[in-house]
Amino acid sequence: MPDNVDASERMVDDWTKQIQETAARYQAMAARMQGQTVTERSKDNTIEVTIDSKGLLTNLVIAEAASGKRMAEVSSQVMRLVQLAQSRIPELLQQAMAETVGTTDETASRVIAEAQSTFPEAPPEDDIAPPEPERHLRFGPEDEEPPPPPAQANPPQNPPQPKPIPRRRRTQDDDDDEFGGSILS
């Protein structure tokens, strides 16, 4: 009987040690990913974006040279660069996992698959059509200005102010408010 108890204790100790080692490796992977950033630049180097390991934008630089571009084009490039940077996160995660916990584990496979679904591949640049410039359509002769708004016959007046509510004076026996005496007693 004591051999069975000792064997059971060793088995539980081994499981505990294995779980602690796995947890330490996952914590090391998480710490490694925490400091990761991805930076992408536009082809003409006028826009630069940096994201963290969670895919959040941490830095955006738009050079003065971009001032000649339409704002719709600049915003489209920013979004494209953010998508491109985010699409690299699963690759970074896979590298960090390979170096810390390994990628053969079922949990690792699930984590990588989740990252790939959260941050899919960015669409090819050719698929993105540049936004159309804004157009304002006017109907009628070009020299015609819109008529001014009609003048109001009676300009609005300030609403009457509410009358102050008269307050009664306190008397000597107002101290206890009918609650049975002082709170200090």
Image: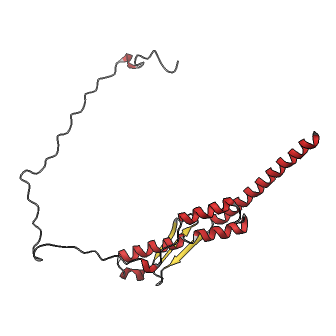
The residue located at (28%, 74%) in the rendering is 134
Decide which of 50, 117 is in the foreground and name it.
117
The residue located at (8%, 58%) in the rendering is 151
Give the vertical position of 157 relative to 140 (above or below). above
State left or right for residue 73 relative to residue 11: left
Tell me residue 97's x, y (percent): 68, 66
The residue most toward the bottom is: 44
The residue most toward the right is: 2
Tell me residue 37's x, y (percent): 59, 70
Q: How is the image coloured?
A: secondary structure
The residue located at (60%, 68%) in the rendering is 90
Decide which of 185, 139 is in the foreground and name it.
139
State left or right for residue 175 relative to residue 184: left
Give the vertical position of 19 relative to 65 (above or below). above
Decide which of 131, 141 is in the foreground and name it.
131
Give the vertical position of 38 relative to 174 (above or below). below
Tell me residue 15's x, y (percent): 80, 51
State left or right for residue 8 relative to residue 148: right
Give the vertical position of 84 relative to 113 (above or below). below
Question: Quadrant where the N terminus lies?
Answer: top right
Tell me residue 28's x, y (percent): 71, 62
State left or right for residue 81 relative to residue 146: right
